[in-house]
Image (tube, helix red, strand yellow):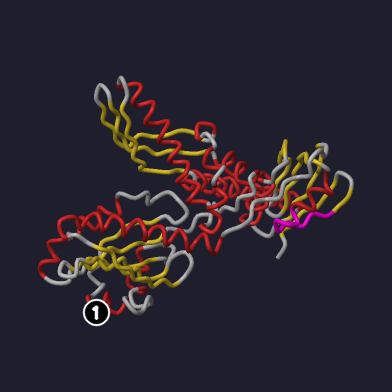
Amino acid sequence: MHGRGVIRLVGLLAGLGAGLVLVLGCKAALADVRVFTIGNYPVDARAQDAVAAKEKAISDGQQAAFRSLLKRLVPVASYKMLASVRQTPAANLISGFAVRSERNSTTSYTASLDFSFDPYKVRDLLRQRGVPYVDEPARVTAVVLVLQPMGLSSASALSPDAWRDAWKGLDLENGLTPVQLHDKPVAVTAEMVKSSMTNPEAPLRTIAVLAKSGQAILAIAEPDVAARRLHVTLSGVDGVGKLLLRRTWRMDASDAPYSAELAAVVAMGTLEGRWKAVHGRAASPLPAAGAQLQPVQIYVEFRNIQEWLRIRRQLEDTPGVSDLTIGGLSSSAANVALRYPGGGPALAGTLGQLGIELRGSGGSWVARGVN
């Protein structure tokens, strides 16, 4: 190939790499939006007039939604560290809200809202308080809803629609463990459902095709009117791996949907808790107090676009980093300029704790991910 052709090919590859970074970057941004959005959140307030009632509902709702976001992001073992964080005014962290449904009167306002929070502000808050968190979402898990009444009377206690509604009332699309609901495929036989209650691999081949991720579980509800119990089994594979969990709830035949809603809430919490237990990480260390901002020029090497996005995000999220700019980008390297308290040596120590090796001297450094 002639020299001019080589130059054109290299330029094309670099352009494709930059384009891929842009596409994946947009996907990462979308994941951020969903993880930091509390959707389908109910609000309700009364006041002297409709305007005041709406303002109060939104103000109280965003603060309550912020508390829900903290419980979503922070591992259960660290909930005790949220005592002071949850009092932070949500108005300073929220980026907006959307209305799903609403109704009002002259003195009241009731609605279902989606509250979106600023990922960077929330992360900074948690790091400043030293609170560990998880903000990397799992791939979508297909949840196949199955209703297996235990006796004729139980069949009327909880309908398939009520079991589905119990799940649809949750925030399924947002969060760390997004879910997509499916009705039971014809290919899933009664024998297969029965086998899945003791073997999470029993339904996999049939239901895994419902999710591109290969993650799929059966959510089997068994209302038992005689015993006043609702048995729920989760069987299959989620974002962590094989899952087989059976729990029993008290059930009043006259209000079985309430027990179903509680079971669905706990099921979603189980998926989320499993994911956080595996992917939890500590907050990034803070820079030394009093250190002066110094310019640092970094040549970032990476093996693939995913690694570049990870390193870039870690640099952007590191407390103390400011004025970060990207001056050049190819399919395997990027030139990054930033300022950091204490300069390169201090930044090298911080990034080392975060899985990024930074070597160099003066204002010129090379960064790469640690295997």
Determine whether, in the image, residue 83 is placed left or right of residue 3.
Answer: left
Picture coordinates of residue 169, whole percent (x, y): 30, 49
Q: Mark 1 — residue?
A: 191
Residue 158: quarter of image: bottom left
- Quadrant of the frame with the C terminus: bottom right
- Position of residue 304 relative to residue 116, above or below, is below
Is residue 20 one of those drawn in magenta?
Answer: no
Out of 315 and 46, give the one closest to the viewer: 46
Determine whether, in the image, residue 104 is placed left or right of residue 268.
Answer: left
- The amino acid sitting under disc 1 is Glu
Determine whether, in the image, residue 237 is placed left or right of residue 282.
Answer: left
- Quadrant of the frame with the N terminus: bottom right
Estimate how packed mark 1 is, as few (under 14), some (14 to 19) or many (20 or more) residues with alpha carbons within 10 Å. Answer: few
Highlighted range, magenta: 351-359
| Rendered residue at 35%/68% (across/down) | 234
| Rendered residue at 25%/61% (across/down) | 183
Picture coordinates of residue 236, whole percent (x, y): 38, 71
Out of 362 and 285, give the one closest to the viewer: 285
- Position of residue 105 relative to residue 264, above or below, is above
Residue, far left: 152
Picture coordinates of residue 353, whole percent (x, y): 73, 57
| Rendered residue at 33%/25% (across/down) | 53
| Rendered residue at 65%/56% (across/down) | 307
